Amino acid sequence: MKRSVLIWIIAILLVAAAGYLVFFNNTGKSDEDGIGFKLQDLNGKEWSVKELKGKRIFLNFWTTWCGYCKVEMPDLERIYQETKDTDLVILAVNVAESKQLVKSFVDNNKYSFTVLLDTGGEVSKQYNISGLPTSIFINSDGTIAEVWPGYMKYEQMLEYINNLK
């Protein structure tokens, strides 16, 4: 009994430490700090944070096998539909899956937000992503405003988006 409690405490501390590292190692960084990237979307168009300077960015790292990622996707679509004519750019970054698998998932669910492919997982490593989903909110000046490791509800997403500068 004591051993299982100890194991749970250690597990909780490890998860908390990972969240702390993701948040505090990224918040306030900018593209000049080396957090920029170039990734292709499902149509082959190349995207980069540098080219989006002046726009607010909502990055969401996800996979098709992640249960919480799948739960978030309809809310991402809802926010995309509500904000597609604003200065907010929503980029859903798929981590380490094939283009064919991701395209099939997106098409089957009729998602219309931009999906980028991090097929080698390099960008997720660059951003210190340790769990999925993870959302990163970037101000229009290119600095990271917030990092949220884990599942987000619609209302939470909106709150972070509304706090972007």
Image (cartoon, grey):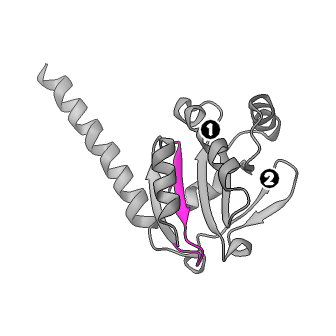
Q: What separation in Å lies between label 1 and label 2 (alpha carbons)?
A: 17 Å
Residue at 45%, 73% in the rendered image:
28
Tell which of 10 and 87 is nearer to you.
Answer: 87
Q: Earlier in the sequence, mark 1 or mark 2?
A: 2
Label 2 sits on what residue type? Asp
Q: Quadrant of the N terminus?
A: top left
* 55 relative position to 136: left or right: right
Question: Can residue 87 be seen by looking at this rendering?
Answer: yes
* 2 relative position to 79: left or right: left
Label 1 sits on what residue type? Met
* Above or below for 100 versus 48: above
Question: Can residue 120 be seen by looking at this rendering?
Answer: no
Q: Which of the 4 image quadrants contains residue 100?
A: top right
- Residue 41: numbered disc: 2
* 10 relative position to 97: left or right: left
Which secondary structure type mostly characterizes the magenta part of the structure?
A: loop
Tell which of 144 and 76 is nearer to you.
Answer: 76
